[in-house]
Amino acid sequence: RSWLARLRMAMEDQQRMLGALYEAVRGTMNSVNETRKKAEEQLQGFRKQTGPEFLSYLCEIAKSAKEIDVRHQALVLLRNNVKRKITLWDKTSSEAQSFITSSLLQILVSDSPGQIIRSCGSVISLIASRDLPNVKETFVAEKWEDLWETLFRMSKSANETHRAAVFLVLADLSEFAMPSVVPHAAPVREALYHGLSDENNEVRLAALRSTVSLLLALPLADLEGMKGCIPIMFQVLSRAVDDEAIQSACESLIKMVDFRGHFFKGSFREILSTMRQIAHSENLQWETRRFAFDVLIAFGRRSKLMVRADKEYPSTTIELGLVFLKAFDTDLDWSDQENDDDQDNMKCALKSFSKLSDILTDESSIEVGLPMIHKYISSANYLERFAGLMALSKLCQGLESKWVDHLEKVVEMIFPFFGDPEPLVQWATINCIGEFCESFEPSFQEKFHSVLIPALITIMDDDKLVARIHIQASKAINLLCAYAENDIVSPHLDQLAAVLLKRLQNSDYPLQVTIFLAICGLAKNADSAFSKYYDVFIPGLLKVLETAHGPKAVELRCTAMQCIGIIGQAVGADQFAENAQQIMQGLLVRLREPEVSADEKDSTYELFGRIGAVMGERFEGYLDQIVPELVKNANAETGSLIDYDEPTPDDPGLSVMVVDLRGLGKKKILMNCNVMLLKTTSVHMLYQFCVDVPKGFFKHIKEVANIAKSLVNFTYDEHCRRGALALVPALLKCATESTSKGSKIVCELFDYLF
């Protein structure tokens, strides 16, 4: 009787626990923040109180609760708790693990709604992928002995949700526990072939994802035996019933192409035809059509030899790029450059043309691309002229050695469009010229400066043109001057300075920013000859630092600082010294203000570096105020990698990138881009001061050596690593020059760094 009473009490306690946990699970779905937060705290309490049994309780709720949403939420919570780094699953008893796996398989084969079946399949695949790599353990093998029989039986179920769930589990097992799949290779292959031909669209897509997962996991030697599935894989695309289905199928194919593009050798023509048909289909959404284009570009990037052997690939991809450029959204206000972010077709096409310049051979780029582009440029349709010019600006990148022989023909082709009646075409023409100034420097400037510089001056002087054209012309002037010889630009200095000064009057921030950049290019090119314009531009630039405040003015202030520094380097210390001292004093005060943005701090430190380069040892007095901040910035933490399900910190400066790492699953890369920018700039400025002001820098050499050593293997930014590497010899030279011969400090520094 005593024993029965204790048993009854234990069962009542368990029921109370289940009831309370049920309410907590339901509370986590509440839309009221306070209620939801309280429920989450209760869950944490249950987790601590019950320990490993917590998973069994969640599984019981998922299995027997009446409310569908609560069952689904219990499965989500079960998955999240199993997925934790320090997981309860490994601490759960073998009996409880067997109960959980058995219960999950029962849910999987039940007549539960689709969301329950899918979530259950996700939990099963997660737990199985943790266990099955250890399948040699007898207990583990017994625990999952029913899994494969259940999956193969469900693959023939009349319930399409069951069939789709099978492939969800198979996809994860192929990725995370491939050794467990190998003994069942034949029935798995049969199930996949049937799934790819299933009458239900959702099942076909699930089978396609599962097939790709298996193909990625198979050894190269075993891939040949799977080539029979290629035609069926593409039938999934042709049978897709909506945009979402096609996009999903394309995503799966891109993943396959990225890792096993050679698998499709011999079938590429069929792929090309299918993707071309999708990308050209006016019945589909533009996003879907872009997905198809992305598949073709992915093939080109990963399997260059294969696509270069196909005669239709160049014409197909170039034509598609032109079609997407022609689909420029004219409903958006083109004069506002912020709207470019919403021009999805243009962004896709320009990115693709940049990649095609690396994918295509020189011959196909010119022989196929140039006639197609010329046809567009010659069109009466202004959107086609725009498309041709934009394509031309990108396609030649990386192929300069071959395209340079065609430059005269190309310039003759595009030069008339400087005066096109459509502002969009004018803008594209100037954009093209700017790209050529950078891609074909310095030969482009040498050959065509006599027509280009006067044309750009005329455009900058024209009051009737919209500001966006003046913005693009300013960028082109900057690029032309930055890469041209001094004797090419010097005859035009007065005119260029005059039109830039004129356009500065009453212009808004975006135009002022690009004019400042053009002045930078002019000052770099003119060097000491820019002295005559010093008093023309410096007062206005200093006024910007004094008066332009607020979030909208950040870019303007940053560019003004860049311009001041470059002008100072051009004219030298004698002319710049007085203003340099004034600037340093003002900016050191400004840096202490709380509202200063990361971009402004970055530009301020770069200006300090330029002033230091001009002033040399006269800059020494400022180092004690600057170097400690640079050291602090260089030591800041900038990034981390966390599981996809882990909460993201509430930080507005944080950028989150979701990556799917094969064998590890989905992860989040957390990057604080503002901190990263300051970190990289600070490392480079430490190098600059070490080189330009070595005597004053010597006292900071030990703490900076710590930075150099710690950042040479910095994970997240190549420029930061390069800066740290450059610091090493600079520090040794600084120590050598600042101490007597044979100094112990130099030897200690060398031993520490190496």
Image (spheres, grey):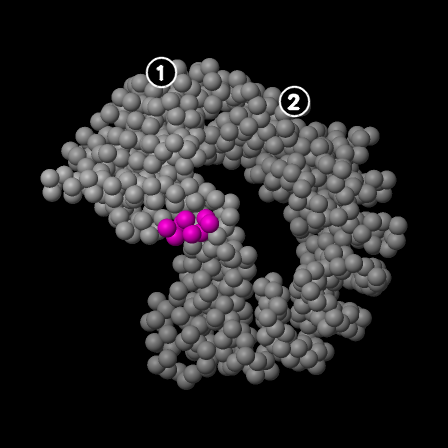
Q: Is residue 742 magenta?
A: no
Q: Amino acid at mark 1?
A: Lys
Query: Of helix, strand and loop, which one carries label 2?
Result: loop
157 or 673, which lies in front? 157
Q: Is residue 40 magenta?
A: yes
What separation in Å lies between label 1 and label 2 (alpha carbons)? 34 Å
Image: magenta residue range: 35-42
Q: Amino acid at mark 2?
A: Asn
Q: If the image is split into quadrants, where does the C terminus sit? A: bottom left
Q: Which mark is residue 156?
A: 1
Q: Give the percent coordinates (x, y) of residue 664.
A: 36, 42
- Please determine whether, in this image, residue 167 is positioned above or below residue 44: above
- The overriding secondary structure of the stretch rendered in magenta is helix
Q: Is residue 103 left or right of residue 400?
A: left
Q: If the image is split into quadrants, where does the N terminus sit? A: top left
Label 2, on which residue?
283
Q: Is residue 315 left or right of residue 741?
A: right
93 or 289, which lies in front? 93
